[in-house]
Image (cartoon, rainbow, N blue to C red):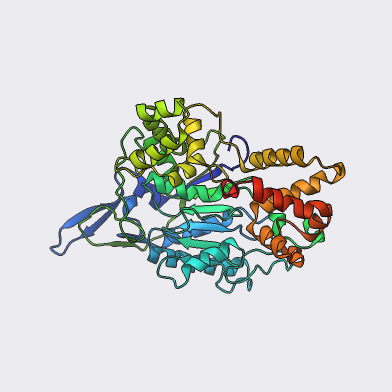
Amino acid sequence: MKDGYLINPTVVDARTEITTELLSEEGFVVSFTDDTGEDQQQAFKQREFEKRFFAEATNQLLCKTFLENALRDPVSGEIGKSIIFAVSQNHAAKLAQILNQMADRMFPGKYQSDFAVQITSQIPDVQQFTINFSNNNLLGSGNFIAAYKTSKTRVCVTVGMMTTGYDCTDILNLGLFRPIFSPTDFIQIKGRGTRRHNFLEQVFDESVKAGVQKPSKIAYKLFDFFANCEYFEKEFNYDEVLKLPRPTGKGSEGGDGPVVIGSAYEHLGADILASMRVEQITAAGMKIDRMFFERFEDTVRENEIVAKAVEAGQWDRVIDYVNREIFDKPEEYYTLDKLRKAAAVDRRITLREILEKVFGLIPRFKSKDELLEEEFAKFVADTKPEEAAAIPAIKTFFKAYITSDRVRQIIESRHFTDLATNPAFSIPDFRAVPKRYRSLVPEYVKDYVTLNQFIS
């Protein structure tokens, strides 16, 4: 983020009168008369929202606030692609219904109840839904601009899906419609919006492209309706050792809340917006982003076997030891995948790179584009192109061939006409490459470049 390769969120801290009371120390206090005629009081906390405390007016208000303040798609002007995280599957279904009703009033006849979709385990073929949303064809393509390929569905409402490893670069809004108490969940959820994106990649009409004023994604909004950011920034005890249970089986979405004795309560009254504060997170990031990686740094630095092996340059021994003796232990459950996510690099960094960074052998992790530039510099030094004017075109081909599976498939199969609809590398791009390099680049990459390090 400091180097501009990822994007920090703009946090929208919005609280209604009811959620403000749920978040307070006293909670939302309900007065009632019990079966014996005695006056009683019961308090509900934020953990109980949509589990034992139901408020239709609050759900309506959260959806309304989200739609009125969400970032818009810079090409079509509709609500930017968004993911909303709900308390439970029932809550997700309820929110999707409300959002569809509101969208039908905002954009009459445009969505036919396809604006928001529930993405939870009870939905058939739900995994394919997540893929289609990323590929911009969930329930069809958008119908605002014919030459612009974007998903007709604008909002996915989920509980525990679309968090870990879900890559959808054109996400503009994330909604936390539930309280979150797991730091791992919080890191994963807010990480869904950090990737940069150029919206012109999905535009296939030059006249439309010319009319887009700000085509690059430079921000995303994180709508926080339950003070999650405040909790993890100010109240969460980071000095505490987190003993997270190792997952066994699939589990149920939504997690287990505290055991509370008593019946559920449905609030039938109104609710109003009590406060809304917008804060742009700086390059320093959030405290929680740094903690997991820093704990791993401390763990390996304090290990004499690791420290001595690194000093001696015995990398095979170091990597084998970390995998056997440090990863996947009950204290922290460190894994390479978790460390990669905590590092927030736009490519697949190796365990050796992580250890080199921990022990100060490299100052920082190089981005995908920095590695690509280094590889291309080696290619130029090796091949010494005489066509100086064509070097930019050769570089574009070189990078696209390394980073795009689809481009490699097209080039290797020689189905060049398929480049006409390829956003990463087009037919004009290919024609600009001198003929000799159309075969030389693939041969060089196969012989000298490790593709795995460029996977996001």
Of residues 305 and 329, which is closer to you in this image?
305
In the rendered image, the residue lying farthest to the left is: 36
**Residue 423 location, x and y as percent?**
71, 58
Of residues 161 and 212, which is closer to you in this image?
161
Q: Residue at x 45, y 37 (%)?
A: 316
Q: Is residue 418 above or below residue 385?
A: below
Of residues 403 and 342, which is closer to you in this image?
403
Of residues 378 and 456, which is closer to you in this image?
378
Answer whether residue 75 is visible to the viewer in this image.
Answer: no
Q: Residue at x 42, y 32 (%)?
A: 297
Answer whether residue 170 is visible to the viewer in this image.
Answer: yes
Q: Is residue 141 above or below residue 2?
A: below
Q: Is residue 400 above or below residue 383?
A: below
**Residue 68 location, x and y as percent?**
58, 56
Q: Residue at x 31, y 48 (%)?
A: 27
The quadrant the N terminus occupies is top right
Tell me which corner region of the image, top left, top right, bottom left or bottom right, holds residue 411. bottom right
**Residue 223 location, x and y as percent?**
50, 50
How many numbered circles does the render carry? Answer: 0
**Residue 258 location, x and y as percent?**
26, 52
Q: Residue at x 23, y 59 (%)?
A: 32
